[in-house]
């Protein structure tokens, strides 16, 4: 019986680190001197892929960054939005996904399309790990094929470096998104990719990224990595920009 | 001068400080005993020293947690002036209504003075000094009661509420007012009553009564209708009537559109002085001119509105906090090209906004003239400290001049910051003030529970969030107007649903509640009121984006709702061509002044009861509030006169009004004393209606209660939370070290 109650060192340290990351967030959440709007949750799109929640344990680091750098009233913890549950999807105006094309069931695909048509926004960001994303070009083609099948009215286009998403809050130097690389070894094939917008007419309904931002700030989960100094901040700044851009465009 | 007080919050807020402290100490003691007991029964073998350390760490965590839960707050309270509170101010109403004798020769003034003389000796013992003043339109000092009651001649007007306000500003211990309770200015009693109650200074009324035979008068003061309306839409035309009646009665009203009677009603007029409005929903029909004529008894007033094929609505959207509402509102308006949206995000948000349509503005203008090109200005989730006094004044001037401000915020923390500001003064609701117990409780609840969301889960496994959307409900007795019909004609499924709302303290008198929350004590969610020549509206919910996400993508209910709401809220384009009488009571051989609102000089003509026509000379009185042409003439006989105005487009507006031999005013109509009104006002301030000596009981505290300043929560610091976490982490590490984990 007592064995079950014991905590492994790794679990203990992980709890401690996440707790430490959350403590300032809890404090600032209680602060009333900031100008915050409606509270909203940061949610991950749950798909049949076992990778859907990869790096999710470090999402509170991102939400804490949101609260420190913007007036967005975002919950410190992360939420689950199951593709098979339309009501759950529609609870969140913005969804983060590891790989939208992993949704294969007709129900999930239908829900996904309906969510987008109602005005939701989906950010897809590929993990940098070659075990998860062995081929980034193939990953992009999968996303394009997915959107073509699920949302025929949508087009996936490459966003120019002058696009507002690179300057609506933080100024992203050169209009190029930051990338994380396996073992921190520069990969020109991966780095040549900018961002891809999912457009329904003039409205942007989502963004596809091959950059692996979520890997950039994950120093706490078992999939975490050590990244060059400042890359974690750059990755979070890019996500903040996309989030704010989505908020300020018409649905 | 301020002094500091400490108070507990949360679950201890309602307890006396000593009881709360005792309870806290008791819980703390029990906790310490429990901690000590828990380490006595620990699994591993511990040295006494390790046991003490571990118990100490756990006790620290427990005590810090207890401190957070107790939620101590520091409050700064202004120290009241030492001499305040011991002076009694006695006000004597010296208006004409108080001095007019009845058939026995008795006056109201004499009656009130007689009553007060019985009370005066006791009052003098209660207060260190007694100050006398007499008033009618103005206030003047007097040496004694006799001086106040006998010196000078009776005045033509009674500014009772203004006088009481003036006296309240002097911060006396109490106020005694000898009056018949009639205020002949335009000020509403409700507004003053709320002010007086908040001041905490008791007001005692000594009523003056006699047996005068009362008279009556009715005046059609103003009619309001938009200058331009869209074809096949509905709009609201309103008549404003001033009626003074000796007893309750019904006043018949009619509206004639293009020569046909389209609406009629009986307005309930209560005894005394009344200002009534009759809003009527009118169908615009096909393009052309629409002549509207309101009739009240033997009076009538007409105006002209243009019905047009299409129009463009310029919307200025100003957002003070980052939130998702803008995305969905913008999407809703972009589906109709007649809406042109210009958006501004508060510069402090450091967000560069790309708007799909309309010009860009860096910040909200300081000048109302720059706002005039917009039919409606939306203030979404704005905080009071984001708007400078110039920006607030520009908004007020803009609405006064015929614009519409639509204030939207679901956040009590944000709305209470507007309490007492210029923006709040024009809005249809009174926000809870910072420091209100109810407001604090609401803020705490909002903070802890956020948007009505049930949350579960944790940082490692992810949470789930269930948002409950609540429907808008129609208020009881909702009246028909273009905007109210949005809700009255909607199916249950088409009524908006919201996730969170801010709390308002009260709906202002004359404001229209359009939607409320469900439940036994419905709260106002959407309201509007006329302010000057424009409208101010307030929506204290989120921007309904969760409602949009909850509806099927094929539904256009949300788009339709926003578009129709904005169309119905905005005064379409100023006021229709009309002529107004500025002289309250037209009298023989006294000049009467009139105003017409056209761009170019109109032709004005007065027609006597005998049919004699007289052309009037007009002068340009246009201002930032709009175009205005003024003219005057002197009626030579009593009876029904007409005034015809014709503009450069040959549109005609008409006014029919009575001219009397003597001026008619509420002051001279021998209205009965408003004893009920005086009683209600007195009791709302802690005073009383004094008919005999026993009624006068001083309830004055030695020091008046001053409002507390913003409490500062002391538990809410990262240092405290960090300490707690550090103690907890240290205990865990120590337990691991001692092989207890």
Image (spheres, coloured by chain):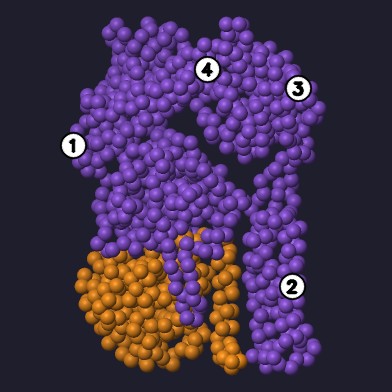
Chain colours: A orange, B purple
Q: Name the residue under label 1.
A: B286
User: For the residue labelled by badge 1, is the local secondary structure a helix, a strand or a loop?
Assistant: loop
Q: Is residue B251 above or below residue B21?
A: above
First in residue order: circle 1 vs circle 3: 3
Other residues around mark 4 within 10 Å, as few (<14) / some (14–19) / many (≥20): many
Q: Mark 4 points at which residue?
A: B671
First in residue order: circle 1 vs circle 2: 2
| Residue A199, percent from left and from top | 27, 70
Q: Mark 2 points at which residue?
A: B30
Query: Residue B33 appears in which quarter of the rendering?
Result: bottom right
Q: Which part of the image, by quadrant, shows the C terminus of chain A?
A: bottom left
Chain ID at mark 4: B
Q: Distance between the residues labelled 4 and 2?
A: 70 Å
User: For the residue labelled by badge 2, is the local secondary structure a helix, a strand or a loop?
Assistant: helix
First in residue order: circle 4 vs circle 3: 3
Same-chain check, marks 4 and 3:
yes
């Amino acid at each position: 019986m007592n064995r079950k109650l014991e905590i492994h060192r790794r679990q203990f340290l992980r709890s401690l680190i996440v707790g430490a990351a959350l403590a300032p967030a809890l404090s600032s959440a209680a602060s009333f001197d900031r100008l915050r709007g409606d509270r909203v949750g940061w949610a991950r799109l749950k798909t049949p892929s076992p990778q859907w929640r990869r790096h999710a344990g470090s999402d509170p680091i991102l939400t804490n960054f949101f609260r420190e750098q913007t007036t967005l009233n975002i919950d410190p913890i992360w939420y689950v939005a199951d593709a098979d549950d339309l009501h759950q999807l529609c609870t969140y105006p913005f969804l983060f996904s590891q790989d939208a094309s992993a949704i294969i069931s007709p129900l999930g695909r239908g829900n996904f399309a309906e969510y987008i048509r109602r005005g939701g926004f989906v950010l897809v960001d590929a993990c940098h790990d070659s075990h998860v994303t062995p081929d980034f070009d193939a990953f992009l083609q999968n996303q394009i094929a997915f959107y073509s099948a699920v949302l025929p009215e949508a087009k996936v286009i490459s966003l120019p470096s002058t696009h507002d998403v690179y300057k609506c809050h933080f100024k992203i130097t050169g209009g190029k998104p930051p990338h994380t690389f396996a073992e921190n070894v520069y990969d020109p094939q991966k780095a040549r990719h900018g961002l891809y917008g999912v457009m329904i007419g003039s409205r942007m309904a989502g963004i596809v990224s091959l950059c692996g931002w979520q890997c950039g700030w994950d120093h706490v989960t078992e999939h975490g990595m050590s990244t060059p100094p400042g890359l974690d901040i750059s990755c979070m700044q890019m996500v903040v920009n996309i989030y704010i851009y989505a908020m300020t465009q018409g649905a | 001068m301020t002094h500091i007080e400490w108070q507990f919050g949360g679950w201890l807020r309602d307890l006396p400080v000593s009881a709360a402290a005792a309870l806290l100490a008791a819980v703390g003691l029990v906790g310490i005993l429990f901690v000590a007991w828990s380490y006595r029964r620990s699994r591993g073998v511990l040295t006494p020293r390790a046991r003490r350390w571990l118990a100490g760490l756990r006790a620290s965590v427990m005590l810090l947690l207890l401190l957070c839960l107790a939620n101590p707050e520091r409050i700064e309270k202004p120290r009241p002036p030492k001499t305040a509170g011991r002076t009694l101010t006695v006000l004597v109403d010296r208006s004409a209504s108080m001095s007019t004798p009845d058939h026995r020769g008795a006056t109201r003034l004499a009656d009130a003075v007689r009553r007060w003389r019985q009370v005066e000796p006791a009052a003098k013992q209660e207060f260190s000094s007694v100050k006398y003043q007499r008033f009618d339109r103005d206030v003047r000092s007097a040496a004694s009661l006799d001086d106040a009651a006998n010196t000078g001649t009776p005045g033509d007007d009674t500014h009772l509420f203004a006088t009481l306000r003036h006296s309240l500003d002097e911060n006396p211990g109490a106020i005694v007012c000898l009056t018949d309770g009639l205020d002949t200015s335009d000020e509403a009693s409700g507004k003053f009553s709320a002010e007086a109650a908040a001041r905490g200074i008791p007001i005692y009324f000594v009523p003056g009564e006699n047996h005068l035979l009362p008279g009556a008068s009715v005046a059609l003061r103003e009619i309001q209708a938009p200058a331009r309306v869209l074809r096949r839409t509905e709009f609201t035309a309103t008549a404003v009537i001033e009626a003074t009646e000796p007893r309750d009665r019904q006043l018949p009203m009619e509206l004639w559109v293009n020569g046909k009677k389209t609406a009629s009603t009986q307005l309930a007029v209560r005894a005394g002085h009344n200002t009534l409005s009759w809003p009527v929903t009118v169908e615009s029909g096909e393009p052309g001119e629409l002549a509207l004529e309101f009739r009240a008894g033997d009076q009538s007033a007409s105006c002209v509105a243009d019905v047009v094929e299409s129009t463009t609505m310029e919307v200025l959207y100003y957002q003070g906090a980052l939130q998702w509402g803008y995305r969905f509102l913008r999407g809703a308006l972009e589906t109709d090209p007649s809406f042109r949206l210009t958006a501004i995000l508060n510069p402090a948000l450091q967000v560069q906004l790309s708007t799909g349509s309309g010009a860009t503005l860096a910040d909200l203008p300081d000048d109302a003239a720059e706002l005039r090109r917009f039919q409606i200005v939306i203030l979404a989730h704005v905080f009071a400290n984001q708007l400078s006094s110039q920006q607030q004044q520009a908004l007020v001037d803009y609405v006064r001049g015929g614009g519409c401000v639509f204030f939207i915020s679901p956040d009590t923390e944000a709305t209470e910051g507007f309490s007492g500001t210029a923006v709040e003064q024009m809005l249809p609701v009174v926000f809870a003030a910072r420091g209100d117990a109810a407001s604090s409780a609401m803020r705490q609840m909002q903070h802890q529970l956020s948007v009505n969301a049930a949350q579960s889960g944790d940082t490692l496994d992810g949470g789930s969030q269930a948002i409950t959307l609540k429907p808008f409900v129609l208020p009881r007795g909702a009246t028909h107007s273009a905007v109210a019909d949005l809700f009255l004609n909607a199916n249950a499924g088409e009524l908006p649903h919201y996730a969170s709302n801010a709390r308002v303290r009260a709906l202002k008198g004359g404001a229209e509640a359009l939607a409320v929350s469900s439940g036994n004590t419905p709260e106002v969610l959407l309201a509007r009121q006329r302010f000057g020549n424009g409208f101010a509206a307030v929506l204290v919910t989120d921007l309904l984006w969760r409602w949009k996400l909850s509806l099927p993508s094929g539904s256009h209910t949300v788009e339709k709702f926003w578009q129709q709401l904005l169309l119905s809220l905005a005064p379409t384009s100023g006021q229709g061509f009309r002529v107004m009488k500025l002289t309250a009571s037209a009298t023989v051989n006294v000049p009467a002044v009139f105003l017409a609102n056209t761009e170019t000089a109109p032709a004005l003509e007065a027609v006597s009861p005998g049919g004699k026509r007289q052309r009037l000379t007009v002068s340009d009185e246009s201002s930032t509030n709009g175009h205005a042409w003024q003219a005057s003439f002197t009626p030579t006989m009593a009876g029904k006169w007409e005034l015809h105005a014709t503009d450069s487009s040959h549109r005609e507006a008409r006014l029919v009004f009575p001219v009397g031999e003597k001026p008619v005013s509420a002051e001279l109509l021998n209205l009965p004393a408003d004893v009920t009104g005086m009683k209600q006002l007195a009791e709302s301030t802690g005073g009383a209606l004094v008919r005999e000596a026993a009624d006068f009981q001083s309830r004055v505290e030695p020091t008046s209660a001053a409002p507390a300043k913003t409490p500062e929560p002391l538990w809410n610091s990262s240092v405290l939370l960090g300490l707690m976490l550090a103690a907890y982490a240290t205990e865990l590490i120590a337990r691991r070290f001692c092989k207890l984990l």
